[in-house]
Amino acid sequence: MCSKAICYYRVSTNKQGVSGLGLEAQQEIALAYCKQNNLEVIGEFEEVQSGGKNDREMIKTALEKCRITHARLVVAKLDRISRDVGFIDQLQKSGIKFVCADMPEANDTMIQFMSVFAQYERRMASERTKAALAAKKARGESLGNPNIKQVQKQIPSEASEKGNAVKIAKADEWASLVIGHIDKAKDNGCQSLQQIADWLNAEHITTSRGNQFTSTSVKRIIDRHQNLS
């Protein structure tokens, strides 16, 4: 489990927001969960907005903070994130870890169930393919494709190219996320690469692999962003 957490609280009406009704209860539940699970709370975000709307500024900011710090999003209940199924689905696919303090096992359990089901489907498809080939062989029919060797030669190369393209795209995206924070570090008086690295680390911002910044990794981000410009 992540050692850092971002807490997000939401109420639906201005009346609730002004009076604090709902917000205090959410905060108490979320912070209690973090304390119980030894999570360091590095940020808290509050929002007064309907859960059916997905253009909420604070949830976007909270999720970006989670992503760039590799922290886990903690909410009191699932509907505090959103009441939109599509939004939750996209959040799960984003790779950002989140947990609902009132049912902490639910998210991982559901995801694991879906993974198990997908694995089962892949296994069944493989078994169906094997059975079909066995039946074909029993009938004396020719198996495979005469050009299969050529196809097999192409697959590793194409897969490798696609894999490299994905890695490059992710690295470029991360550089675009971090460069704004590097600019903030400079605005705060950081001049050397090491000073910038120290500032980023103090803000809990990590490298794409979740490690602390060094002067070298800061330079890599700057160089990559310049190449993108």
Image (tube, rainbow, N blue to C red):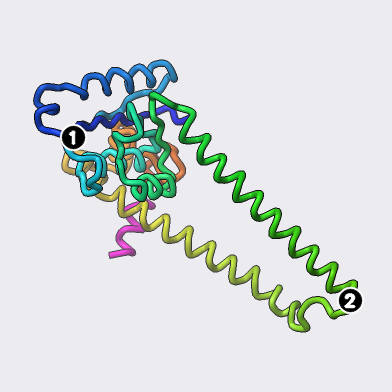
Residue 149: image quadrant is bottom right
Q: Residues within 10 Å of mark 1 (few under 14, many from 20)?
A: some
28 with respect to 140 (left or right): left
User: Left or right of 21: which side holds 209?
Assistant: right
Q: Which mark is residue 112?
A: none
Q: Is residue 35 left or right of residue 152?
A: left
Q: Quadrant of residue 31?
A: top left
Nearest to the observer: residue 161 or residue 108: 108
Q: How many numbered badges does the structure rendering display?
A: 2
Q: Quadrant of residue 30?
A: top left
Q: Is 84 or 9 nearer to us in this picture?
A: 84
- Up/down of 134 relative to 96, above or below: below
Measured Cα–Cα span from mark 2 to mark 1: 66 Å
Task: Indicate the amino acid at tag 2.
Answer: Arg
Residue 140 shows in the view: yes
Residue stretch in magenta:
219-229
Helix or strand or loop: what does disc 1 sit on? loop
SS for tag 2?
loop
- What amino acid is found at the position of numbered circle 1 in the picture? Ser
Instruction: Say which mark, if any, is on residue 12.
Output: 1
Q: Which badge, 2 or 1, is on the more N-terminal residue?
A: 1
Residue underneath mark 2: 139
Where is residue 68? Give x, y as percent.
Answer: 35, 42
Q: Which residue is pictured at 38% across the width and 39% down the height?
A: 206
Q: Is residue 220 magenta?
A: yes
